[in-house]
Image: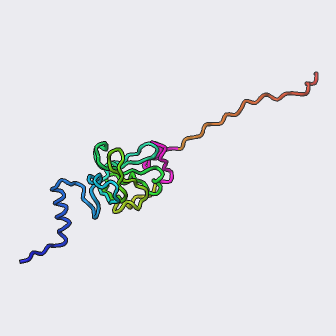
Amino acid sequence: MRETVDMDSRPIALAVIMLLCGQATPVLAGCIPFREAPKHVGETKCVSGKVLRVKPGSRGVHFFDFCEDYRVCPFTVVVFASNLKHVGDVRQLEGKDIEIHGTIKEYDGRAEIILERAGQLSGEAAKIPALPKGYDVEQKGRYSAGQFSYPHSSPKKRQKKQQPPIVTEEPEPE
């Protein structure tokens, strides 16, 4: 007797197997988990994982942390300041599962993908909004999307002390 497999139960079975094997982040269609990225350095792949933090670095560079301790994490995503306008507000990706497509490179002993445009992201991550117009990556601590701050007044201009007018006529004697 031949058994039939219900096609709707396959994704559930795959998720159960992944959880039993200790893989917390689901492998999205055609993507490799971020922990396997170092095995594919030099290849163009899709890498998936959950972004725990988006950390701004020096000069507007942003890093995606997929591990609690970024120093021992085998993979990271880097967005340079010049690419932020093409990618969007990457801060919105914090806490989300993402799929990123690109060439896996090695830098400082770990694998990374450089995110240069929004088209490299797929799934829910591809729907991030554009950067706010007033956002300046070089001004740390000066911008917050959720807080209002009053504009700073310009320094008051001081008027120069004027000399009293010089009298050229002598007063008439009384």
Residue sitting at x 71%, y 32%: 160
Placement of 136 over or under 86, stated as above or below:
above
Q: Position of residue 59 (x, y in %)?
A: 46, 44
Residue sitting at x 29%, y 48%: 74
Placement of 138 over or under 17, stated as above or below:
above
Q: Is residue 59 magenta?
A: no
Q: Is residue 171 left or right of residue 141?
A: right
**Residue ranking furthest to the bottom:** 1
Q: Position of residue 82 (x, y in %)?
A: 48, 51
Q: The N terminus appears in which quarter of the rendering?
A: bottom left
Q: Is residue 144 magenta?
A: yes
**Residue ranking furthest to the left:** 1
Q: Locate residue 151: give its quadrant.
A: top right
Residue sitting at x 49%, y 48%: 136
- Between 129 and 32, the residue placed more toward the observer is 32
- Between 68 and 45, the residue placed more toward the observer is 45
Q: Position of residue 145 (x, y in %)?
A: 44, 50
Q: Is residue 111 left or right of residue 166?
A: left
Q: Is residue 138 left or right of residue 95?
A: right
Magenta region, residue range: 132-150
Q: Locate residue 24: give its quadrant.
A: bottom left
Q: Tag count in the figure?
A: 0
